[in-house]
Image: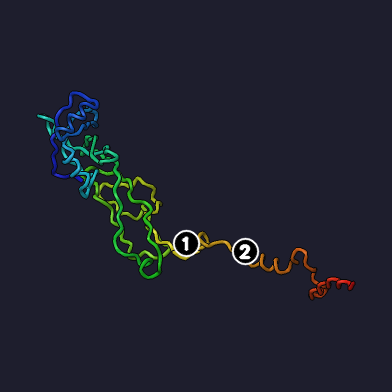
Amino acid sequence: MRKDITIAAEHRTSRGKNEARRLRVANKIPAIVYGTGIDPIAVAVSPKEVNKILFSKTGHNTIFDVKVADAASEPVLIVDWLRDPIKDNLLHVDFLRIDLAKRIKVKVPVHTVGVSVGVKMQGGLLEAIVREVEVECLPDDIPEMFNVDVTELGVHQAVRASELPMTGSMKLISASDAVLVHVVTLRAEAVVEEAKVAEPEVIKKGKKDEEGAAAAPAKGGAAPAKGGAAAPAAKAPAAKKK
């Protein structure tokens, strides 16, 4: 979607780490503008202005203008960017020139709207499978997002990419049978989880050991008599009288 936004850029004559460091001190980042058969231009832009676009509703699908020095403004899209993995600072950005009269391919986010009857009434679980789809359209027809109403979605029902409304010049590029969102039952999953966490039955050896010890004769003692009764212990011989 095109926005009435213009980002000022200045020519960049050198490259490398030293140049990037110098730009960061000046609150700038390196960038490049390319596309539409025109030679690429190395520029420097404000990361603050770029972040405003990236964090807007239309995000990287926003079409805006870049004005390099005294040259005429050009409509562009943000097609790539790099952030510091620790500080999350914007380090570099790529701008693609756009011909407003030619169709382009973009990825559009998919959002769900409402509470599914399968979740509210049937105890199911709503799962978002695909969070963006690719479409082809004229730059002015790029949608901010696709809203999928899941209110009437019951258990074992799904919404596929083919059900998204393609208006204006839009044409679906993603697989038409791709599942965007569905509702699954929790019953089967609960059984699987119970099977995973169930502990195997452990034989209590202590009790058997005690029973075995009771049945075994003591060392030097008499063996049990046949029939289970213990044999009487032998009497010691009487002492002889002198």
Observer-nearest of 20 and 96: 20
Residue type for callout 2: Ile
The residue that appears at 24% across and 49% down in the rendered structure is: 143
Circle 1 sits on which residue? 189
Where residue 125 appears, as percent x and y from the top left, is: 39, 62
Q: Is residue 152 left or right of residue 35?
A: right
The part of the image, by quadrant, that contains residue 122 is: bottom left
Label 2, secondary structure: give it: loop
Looking at this view, name the residue that lies furthest to the top.
Answer: 14
Where residue 31 appears, as percent x and y from the top left, is: 21, 32
The part of the image, by quadrant, that contains residue 138 is: top left
| Label 1 packing within 10 angstroms: few (<14), some (14-19), many (20+) | few
Q: How much space separates mark 2 and mark 1, taking CA atoms?
A: 29 Å
Where residue 168 appears, as percent x and y from the top left, is: 25, 49
Observer-nearest of 59 and 195: 195
Label 1, secondary structure: give it: helix
Above/below status of 124 relative to 60: below
Circle 2 sits on which residue? 203
Where residue 32 appears, as percent x and y from the top left, is: 22, 31
Observer-nearest of 161 and 92: 92
Residue type for callout 1: Glu
The residue that appears at 54% across and 62% down in the rendered structure is: 199
The residue that appears at 18% across and 44% down in the rendered structure is: 52
Above/below status of 103 relative to 232: above
Labels 2, 1: front one = 2
